[in-house]
Image (cartoon, rainbow, N blue to C red):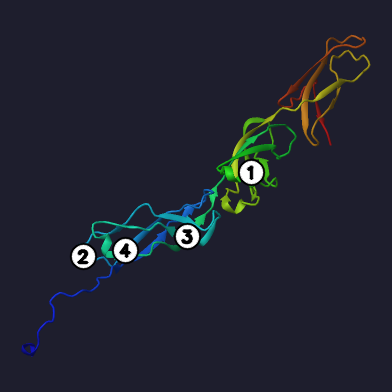
Amino acid sequence: TNYNYQLFKNIVNANIFQRTLNISFTTLTKTYNALTAGQTTYTISGIIFGDIVDISNIYITNFVDINVGSNKLVYLNQINLIGSSYFNYITSISGNTNGNLIPAQLIPNFYSLGKVYDRNQFAPISYNLSGFFPLDIGLVDISQNWIANYRNVNVNYNIPIDISNIILYGSVANNYYINSTITISGIITKRYIYAIGNDKNYDQAIVALLTISNIILNDTIAYFANFININAGANKIIYVSLSDTFLPNVWQRRLKIN
């Protein structure tokens, strides 16, 4: 039927609209750093084979706030297309997605204050913290309810100290985590005991008896105590020494405090 028609004009006009691209963003899980900036990856669908189109890497990803949380709102801005065929496509210039922001680790640097032997496991310790951000100074700390115990109550220079119940507190404590237990080493030094010589009547022996103080309850010590000679006299010198073991001889005495 074309025979019955003819074109009034053979040039006309119409629009070719830009093709819409579908872009899917995925927010990478982020560790707390007191900033909102995040990172995302993306996939693009809708590009016709042979065309070169991508997103400029200058786009901006920001969590809604700096605090730790799950499935948090994430804002995307400055999403611009690049590539030799970019002008044939269109996408949203901004958008949003969701992501997770997880706590950062705080490191407690505990150190032993040492102590004098007291037959008790309690370990005096102190600490400083590392790993928090300047914005949070004064807003997070460790509760003073920790438990610190020596594994051995006897004198030594390298005794393990087990620290437990390490708990964070403060208005930004939720943005951090900390190991609840840790082990360090500490010192227990020897305890001084004080001796006073006891008077006695001449008995032709140099053995002396002492009154000793500052001994821990239920501890037993063995000692040697001898006058300088057997003769009677005032304010006579007594030589005193401690023994590691009790030896059954006439020169040694054992003292137990109950």
Specify which label sits upstream in the sequence, 1 or 4: 4
| Figure quadrant of the N terminus | bottom left
Tell whether label 1 touches label 2 (CB within 8 Å): no
In 3D space, how far apart are the residues under numbered discs 2 and 3 (Cα atoms)? 31 Å
Q: Is residue 116 left or right of residue 163?
A: right
Are dots 1 and 3 in contact, CB under 8 Å? no
User: In the picture shown, does residue 134 fall above or below 66?
Assistant: above
Name the residue that disc number 1 marks. 163
Secondary structure under the numbered disc 2 in the rendered image? loop
- Crowding near the residue tagged with mark 3, few <14, some 14–19, many ≥20 C-alpha atoms within 10 Å: many
Which comes sooner in the sequence, label 4 or label 2?
Answer: 4
The quadrant holding residue 108 is top right
Amino acid identity at mark 3: Val
Residue type at the position of mark 4 = Ile
Which residue corresponds to the image point at 40% horizontal and 61% vertical from the top-left?
A: 26
Pointer 2 residue: 49
Q: Secondary structure at mark 4?
A: strand
When the figure is inspected, residue 221 is found, relative to residue 76, above or below; the finding is above
Task: Bin the neighbour count of mark 4 within 10 Å (Cα to Cα): few under 14, some 14-19, many 20 and up.
Answer: few
Dots 2, 3 in contact, CB < 8 A: no
The residue type indicated by label 1 comes to Ile
